Amino acid sequence: MDETQKELENRKKKILNKIIPFMKEPLNLALVTVLLFAFVLRLYYFIKVGNQPLWWDELCYGSLAKNFITHTWDSTTLILGETAIRPVLFPLLWSILLRVGIPEGGVRFFLEFIPSILSVFFVYLIGKETFNKRVGIISAFIFSVLWIHLFYTVRLLTHAPALVFLFSSIYLFMKATETKFNFNLFTISLILLSLSTLMRYPKGIIFFVYLFMLVIDKKLLLKNFKFWKAGILGISPMIVFFIYNFVKYQNIFPALLGGGYLDKGGSPLIKPIAFNLLNFIPVYLKTTFFIFFLIGLLLILFELITGYNLIPKIKKLKNSLILILILILIYSFFIFYMRAAEDRWLFPTILPLAIITSLGIDFVYNQIKKYNKQIAVLCVILILGFGAYSQLTFADSLIKGKQESYLQMRQAFEWIGSNTPEDSIIAGLGIEPYTVYYAKRDYINLPQNYSEVGVALEADYLVAHLFAGNPPKYLSEYLSENQDIWQPLNAWFLDEAKTQPAVILYKKVQ
């Protein structure tokens, strides 16, 4: 055996000598098992539905990404409107991947699949940092099976990737303020939170959590130059973002201050306070996990109330307060300000939900362990098994049930992109991102009423479809009266028998 081979064998032995003792420790083995399970679970759905059609929001991000490269649609209503209200980081990263030749499936892998796995690991780290290793592992498992996270992991949206920046930021903030203030970790934590915010704007609420914790922990070191330096460096991505917006829109945050988010949610002066959004908690957790969430919530609130004056001195209390504040502030923003929300808008709250639920399960484990450790372990396994079953059956049904939604729209606009001249103009209602992303064509929006339908004559093709309340009522009448102008060219159907057209493409013949 030559020296090179000996060196290789020695390296193998050193690695094995570290791995084997590590894996012999039960909690380490459990952690590796949970992470491997999370990986396999996500890989299954990535393979199963990784090529599914994109939804409206996905198409908008994809259209922005393609326009970053070509700038073909800079002046269109789609790009102008979406650029003002959509977070910039996600389509920017998407465009970088497109530039190096990575297709949509690869984009999904790098921007959704990998961040999803990393998020599971950071949930473990935060749970471990707050309570103990066992709570961290249970938290990671619960998070790995939550239907809401699984479902949006297979969608090209900002929710899942923004979480990995957020969770890593929270973990580093906890470490930075654990004892002596660590300026380097604080800077990195703020940079990560800034990136999370630039991927999903409501994540910026967590800045207020950090500010509150710095105040009560007496670490708001306003007279310390290093603190200011760390803070400014940390939020530098946000500063650049605000300057860019001010130069372009004369508004540092047009999505929020310009009413973009209120347009999607509703005016706080009109809509009632949305306490009904609290119903999302049992919806996320389902019955089994929700029961233990309530137990964990009582425990954590009891400890915070009884030890309120000790919070800055005890790491567990301090980190517990961070989790509670995340829950309170995120829900307060949508309940009292937005007064509306979809399930995905409350995504950051699944971190405290998973960890608090784990605390409740760990409490039950410790009570039973006093009498019999084996039974305690079995109870935890059963609880997690029942909880995971309800999560995974719901997730599986939802993911597969939505797998082919808007398929006919993708088929139609991909066909348009391959079978029409590049300078073609497509008319339709609710077709903007489909036309840009799939067909790479210009578009004209049809009006809502018959009197203005003459605008369609400027187009070369016209699309009528059944999605999102389409087509407008007058369109059938208009097409029937103008058969000499518009003739059917192709159609895509909801059923295999081809009796229910979902999308019809018309060509202007004169």
Image (cartoon, helix red, strand yellow):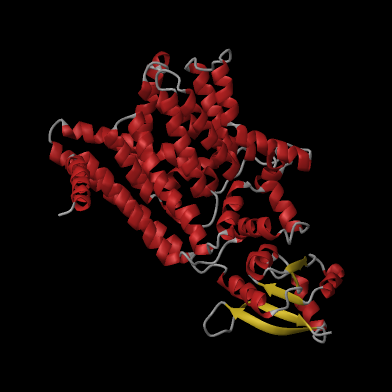
Is 478 in front, or is 257?
Answer: 257
Is 396 in front, or is 163?
Answer: 163
Residue drawn at x 56%, y 28% as measured from the top left: 208
Q: Can residue 258 be seen in this view?
A: yes
Residue 446 image offset from top left, x and y in percent: 78, 67
On screen, 172 above or below 420?
A: above
Residue 99 image offset from top left, x and y in percent: 59, 59
How many marks can you see?
0
Q: Which residue lies furthest to the front in this view?
A: 2
Q: In which quarter of the image is residue 505?
A: bottom right
On screen, 212 above or below 457?
A: above
Q: Quadrant of residue 61?
A: bottom right
Is 477 in front, or is 369?
Answer: 369
Q: Residue furthest bottom?
A: 484
The answer to whether 426 appears left or right of 132 in the picture is right
Residue 287 image offset from top left, x and y in percent: 36, 47
Name the quadrant of the C terminus: bottom right
Is 327 in front, or is 286?
Answer: 327
On screen, 51 above or below 381?
A: below
The answer to whether 469 appears left or right of 181 in the picture is right
